Amino acid sequence: MTENPEGPGTSPDSWTVLRLLEWTTEFFKQRGSSSPRLDAEVLLAHARECSRIDLYTAFAEEPEEEQRIAFREMVRRRGEGTPVAQLVGYREFYSLRFRVNEDVLIPRPETEHLVIEALDCAKAMNEPAAELSIADVGTGSGAIAVTLAKHLKNTSITAVDQSTAALKIARWNAEQHGVADRITFVESDLLDAVTAPDRFDIICSNPPYVSESEFEQLSPTIREHEPKQALVAGPKGTEVIERILPLAAERLRAGGRLILELSPMIADDVETLANQSSELADLRFIKDLEGNRRILSLLRV
């Protein structure tokens, strides 16, 4: 790391694709990245306007000066904490590409478990024969709503967010994936401004579920670059979910399901809250790849 302290591409030496990746991976390791090699590959592929897989057949090539300059700037900003997804402007989610910026949460792999549960529930409700209505509460980038619309052809979806800026991103993503005609976007605090349909078959939500104290322990990359209002629920972390549970009992049809993402840290508290409702039953948790309770699924009886 001492051979070029100013970063890759700043000297006349031979900076091949492989050397750039190796240098940057080590640099990101020192900056605390949890996926340094992946970060390096995504940024270099973006600078070269190619796919990550194309890098592996170009290890001996030297990127053009303009590409090195663009890459070096992204590496600098990533080293300062800017998320990779915001640097390149997108994140892959459920094999789809979603535009993101500082106005929306970056879609995480854990949320794909919510999508899988929703697709399984829809199948059990006889989709594609049935015409289903789904609400995505707190849609953000639209990742959940758009992904479900892509896979459930006869389904109408209401995507809700209280952020005007987030809804703009969600609409753009829906248009890019050709499903905007089946998604209604509503600016609303939860479902307060949603008047139709009266009842939904499925309500999905990746709501704010971080406590205020937990937020202070998050990495600076998250705290400083993603919208706090989409992360923090309140002092306990359960405040928004506490509002969603009775709302689901009111707005789901009998036999419908509420599917929530949550923090494993509040899973016990949320289970207690859910069990207090006489209209919500068949409680089950879906675990993430690390074995943590990440998704809660409830039946409206």
Image (tube, helix red, strand yellow):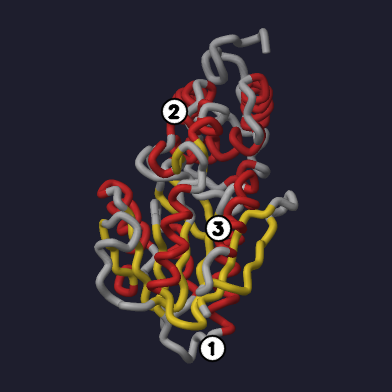
Identify the secondary structure beneath mark 2: helix
Which structural element holds mark 1? loop
What's the CA distance linking mark 3 and mark 1? Answer: 30 Å
The total number of labels drawn is 3
Q: Is residue 252 visible?
A: yes
Q: Camera-side residue: 106 or 256?
A: 256
Residue 255 position, x and y percent, is 51, 82
Q: Which structural element holds mark 3?
A: helix
Q: Tell me: residue 71, above or below residue 289.
A: above
* Residue corresponding to mark 3: 273
User: Does residue 223 appear left or right of residue 272 in this picture?
Assistant: left
Q: Is residue 285 left or right of residue 229?
A: right
State the CA–CA distance, disc 2 to disc 3. Answer: 31 Å
Instruction: Determine whether 11 is above or below 16 in the image.
Output: above
Compared to residue 104, the image places residue 280 above or below, namely below
Q: Name, please, the residue furthest toward the bottom.
A: 129
Which residue is the site of mark 2?
A: 224
Closer to the chain start, of discs 2 and 3, is 2
Residue 281: image x %, image y %?
59, 73
- Quarter occupied by the N terminus: top right
Which disc is residue 126 wearing? 1
